[in-house]
Amino acid sequence: MNRFFATGVSPLTVDSLTSGFNISTNLSLEIDFHDLMGFRPAEVADVLRQVGASEDNIPALIADLKDWYNGYLFHPKATERLYNSDMIMYFASYYEKRQEYPDMMLDANIATDYYKVKKIFNIQQREQEFIPILKELTTEGVLTAEITRFFNLEKPIAEYDLISLLFYMGWITIKDITSGLYNFQMPNRVIRELYYNYFIDIIEQESGLNRTMPKIKNALSQLSNYNNPHPFLDLIKALIDKDLSFRDAQGFDERHLKMLLIPYLSLSASHFVASEPEWETGYPDILLLKRPNITTKYNFIIELKYIKLSDKDKSTENKIEKITEKVERDARTQLSNYLETDNAKRIPNLKAWIIILVGREWQVVEEVTVI
């Protein structure tokens, strides 16, 4: 045998595989091989043509698929982010038969990656030690680390090793590079939903609450079909009352509140969640947009605020009311500005809500009329 070429092998397996000889070369981070990792946009367009998509429909299809399946960058100097080829072929197979979107944009084969992600976080039986990395990723959206080139399981895995494993497995991808350190992010909506499901499991382990799917589905149905957020917020309120991290009030802020809401909202069968998308006048906190091929009545834009109460504030009811009124005015102004944009006007049946948590109570849950 003159040469040996292996693909689809985890870096841990590579290290075991090549431990007996020292002339192997890891090509994973070579820019010349970058485009082998997935489909480029032009290749996705070719696939769509082959399954019967018209030229008029291809731009809209690619725009949707970009959000769900694109985003992968395996070298900071690569010029195009790649689409996940497995996800594209799953979509193409369905589209060829029916000329419509699949009911579930997440392939069941990819959905099982949830257990692989969980296994990575539990490497060397150290899940609790590595959970802060998961929380940072879902809360901040970015992880920063060097890329580990070689792994040695005889030694304890460090945090940057775990982050590198997530990168090699395609569960995070390169955002950019700063001062020699890589900034990693979740590549697309499919991967975000995997992390959100894992995050929910962690939240419930910490809080001692078990997820009851019928209640959640009913609450999300009340929101999507009847424009009623209250049942859903009641469930979140129960979680806040039990959540261990919330008991450390000094460390809890609006970002943490958002990251309690978003994973649960992502369980909706009718909507997908966008956090702080870039609009003409700023970044709305949360958007709930109807999934393709789903019949439901409303889309939503939510302005979310959190007011932290000190012990001193708790004893001054008048002061709390004044603070809440000011925050509500600011939220209303922000939301009104968003609603005047072309971004909002392009979304049919858009409902707008201000949601303000004061301490542990929902003090303001108010709909803003879309003109």
Image: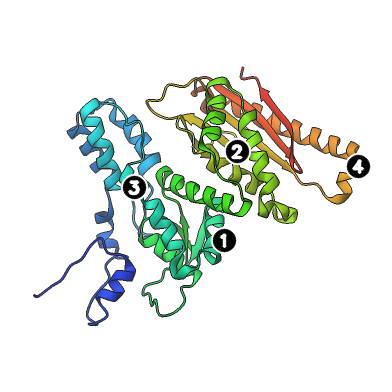
- Say whether residue 258 is left or right of residue 95: right
Mark 4 to mark 1 CA distance (whole Å) = 35 Å
Against 16, residue 277 (above or below) is above
Residue 107 percent coordinates (x, y):
32, 41
- Marks 2/3 in contact by CB < 8 Å: the verdict is no
What residue does disc 1 label? 132
Where is residue 267? Give x, y as percent: 49, 38
**Vertical order, 366 against 70 (above or below):** above
Q: Residue 216: which quarter of the image? A: top right
Mark closer to the observer (2, 4)? 4
The image shows residue 179, relative to residue 155, as above or below, that is above
Where on the picture, by quarter, is residue 315? Answer: top right
Q: Which one is earlier in the sequence, the residue at label 2 or at label 3? A: 3
Looking at numbered disc 4 in the image, what kind of residue is underneath it? Answer: Thr
Q: Which quarter shows the N terminus?
A: bottom left
User: Which residue is at 9% across, 75% downward?
Assistant: 2
Q: Amino acid at mark 3?
A: Ile
Q: CA distance from mark 1 to mark 2?
A: 23 Å
**Looking at the image, which residue is at 54% across and 30% down?**
220
Element on which disc 1 rests: helix
Lower sequence index among marks 2 and 4: 2
Q: Nearer the viewer, mark 2 or mark 3?
A: 3
Residue 81 in sight in this render: yes
Q: Which residue is mark 2?
A: 285
- First-in-chain label (1 vs 2): 1
Q: Quadrant of the C terminus?
A: top right
Q: CA distance from mark 2 to mark 4?
A: 29 Å
The amino acid type, in three-letter code, at marker 2 is Asp
| Whether label 4 touches label 1, CB < 8 Å | no
Label 2, label 3: how many angstroms apart (C-alpha)? 28 Å
